[in-house]
Amino acid sequence: MKIVVASDHAGFPLKEKIKDYLHSLNHEVVDVGTNSLDSCDYSIFGIKAGEMIKNKQVDLGIIACGTGIGISIACNKVKDVRCALVNGVEFAKLTRMHNNANVMALPGRFMSEEDALKCVDAFLNTPYEGGRHDRRINIISEYEKEHSK
Ligand code: RB5
């Protein structure tokens, strides 16, 4: 798969671990930054990751900031993004199964590397269930279509 990764400074160490892990699994990784521990704005990187999804340049995204909250809010502003803030393996599985999430946001300051990599496995390996969930997701997509300029 082709996967975009992004973070702010607070998510940077986790992003680097995830990038290494994805490479070890032979995925193609697009890193849109940030690239250091220097303080920066999560919004910029959440939007950059979202743009890669919107433009169909990648299959999925994995992003991180301190809590995962700010970067997920930013990413979800981009059309066609369904970014889920994930705090454990069950959330990673369920957001694929029920929400067909295409981006997972992780809390770099509140999750161990070990748990994060388990979430990565769950996110990449769990299929979308479809069925009744299509209707719910379509309501969001229709709203987005009608209200975006
Ligand atoms: C940065 O200090 C922190 O605010 C940011 O990483 C994130 O947690 C925001 O939601």
Image: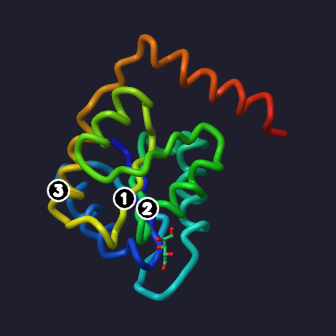
Q: Does the residue labelled 2 lie within 8 Å of ligand 1?
A: yes
The residues bearing labels 1 and 2 have C-alpha atoms spaced at a distance of: 5 Å
The amino acid type, in three-letter code, at marker 3 is Ser
Q: Mark 1 points at which residue?
A: 106
- Residue sitting nearer the eye, 58 or 88: 88
Query: Do the residues under discs 1 and 2 have CB atoms within 8 angstroms?
Result: yes
Element class at badge 2: loop
Q: Name the residue under label 2.
A: 68
User: Where residue 48 appears, x then y in whole percent?
Assistant: 58, 59
Callout 3 secondary element: helix
- Relative side of 140 to 135, left or right: right
Task: Classify mark 1: residues with Cα within 10 Å, few (<14), some (14-19) or many (20+).
Answer: many
Q: Residue at x 20, y 59 (%)?
A: 21
Amino acid on which the number 2 mark rests in the picture: Gly
Is 42 placed above or below 142 here? Answer: below
Label 1, secondary structure: give it: strand
Q: Mark 3 points at which residue?
A: 24
Residue at x 80% of width, y 34% of height = 147
Q: Is residue 108 left or right of residue 101?
A: left
Q: Residue at x 74, y 29 (%)?
A: 145
Where in the figure is residue 66, as x and y percent of width and height?
41, 71
Sequence-earlier tag: 1 or 3: 3
**Image quadrant assignment for residue 4:** bottom left
Q: Does the residue labelled 1 lie within 8 Å of ligand 1?
A: no
